[in-house]
Structures are given as structure tokens and as C-alpha cells.
Image: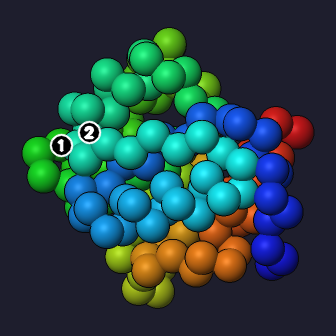
């Protein structure tokens, strides 16, 4: 996978759900460098407020979160007609054999393992978005 050209994100809003501050900041920085507008939140509860506020093009979901976990948060988004159409990508340290299949079977639009690869992160997400946008 190639590096995304700068500006490729075209200002689209991506919400990064990540309770680890350094990981959240890294993901945001990489996204902003590729022309996305990145909004970071620490918990699923903050995510539900942020989706209403920001109408994101995509949500990046950490799975291990304090409180409601990323899988439960994903299902709550899917269960609400107002947010059911938002692409959601699992970004997680669960990177054992079978984990990608497990998250895709759960209904996530994509899966990326942590630590993220800063060179390919944005272009991987663009590819997932383009698949969803047809
Ligand atoms: Mn976490």
C-alpha cells in the first residue's frame, strides 16, 4: 500500500476513539497530514456525542476502552438509524490469527492492527472509504 498524497482526505471528518493519549494523538496527526479533519475522543460515551456534533465520514474504533467497549459501541451506532450508515473501522491491538476475520464478521467495515503503520494508515483508510462509497 502506498502513502496517501497530502490532501487526499479532502477535509472529511474522522472520529478517532482511543483511550491511550499517545495513540490517539498519533492517529490524529497522521490523518491531518493526509487532509482529513480528525476528532479524538477517549470513550464510547464521548463518541456518541461527537457523531451528532461532527457527522463524520468514518469512525476509527479502538476495541479495549474504559466503560463500553468498541464492539458494543459499534453495535449501538449500527442500531441507530441516524448513525447506522457511518463506516466503522476497528483499530486494535487484537492482532492474533483470526482477529481480523472476527471483527469483519462482527460487521466492521475494516480492521487495522496497532501499532498503526504511519506510512500506510491514511491510504488504508481511504481504500476502505472508497470501497464503501463504491
Ligand atoms: Mn484502548
Q: Residue furthest bottom?
A: 97
- Can residue 107 be seen here? The reply is no
Tag shown at residue 68: 1
Which quadrant of the rendered structure holds the C terminus?
A: top right
Instruction: Categorize mark 1 by other alpha carbons within 10 Å: few (<14), some (14-19), many (20+).
Output: some
Give the residue at x 32% y 26%.
Answer: 48
Give the residue at x 51% y 76%.
Answer: 116
Q: Which residue is mark 2?
A: 44
- Can residue 27 be seen here? The reply is yes
Check contact, mark 1 vs mark 2: CB within 8 A. yes
Percent from the top left, x then y, of residue 58?
Answer: 59, 39
Give the residue at x 44% y 24%.
Answer: 51
- As drawn, is 43 to the left or to the right of 22? left
Tag shown at residue 54: none
Q: Is mark 1 within 8 Å of ligand 1?
A: no
Task: Identify the image quadrant of residue 126.
Answer: bottom right
- As drawn, is 17 to the left or to the right of 31? left
Give the residue at x 50% y 13%.
Answer: 82
Percent from the top left, x then y, of residue 79?
Answer: 41, 23
Q: Is residue 113 above or below residue 67?
A: below
Element at label 1: loop
Percent from the top left, x then y, of residue 70?
Answer: 31, 50
- As drawn, is 115 to the left or to the right of 2? left
Instruction: Categorize mark 2 by other alpha carbons within 10 Å: few (<14), some (14-19), many (20+).
Output: many
Task: Identify the image quadrant of residue 133.
Answer: top right
Which quadrant of the rendered structure holds the N terminus?
A: bottom right
Element at label 2: helix
Q: Is residue 25 above or below residue 2?
A: above
Q: Earlier in the sequence, mark 1 or mark 2?
A: 2
Instruction: Report the coloring of the rendering.
Output: rainbow
Amino acid at each position: 500500500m502506498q502513502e496517501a498524497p497530502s490532501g487526499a482526505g479532502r477535509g472529511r471528518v474522522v472520529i478517532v476513539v482511543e483511550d491511550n493519549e499517545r495513540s490517539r494523538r498519533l492517529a490524529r496527526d497522521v490523518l491531518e497530514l493526509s487532509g482529513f479533519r480528525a476528532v479524538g475522543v477517549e470513550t464510547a460515551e464521548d463518541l456518541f456525542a461527537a457523531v451528532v456534533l461532527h457527522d463524520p465520514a468514518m469512525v476509527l474504533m479502538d476495541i479495549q476502552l474504559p466503560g463500553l467497549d468498541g464492539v458494543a459501541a459499534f453495535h449501538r451506532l449500527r442500531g441507530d438509524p441516524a448513525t447506522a450508515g457511518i463506516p466503522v473501522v476497528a483499530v486494535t491491538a487484537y492482532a492474533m490469527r483470526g482477529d481480523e476475520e472476527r471483527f469483519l464478521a462482527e460487521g466492521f467495515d475494516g480492521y487495522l492492527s496497532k501499532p498503526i503503520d504511519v506510512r500506510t494508515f491514511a491510504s488504508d483508510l481511504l481504500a476502505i472509504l472508497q470501497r464503501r462509497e463504491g
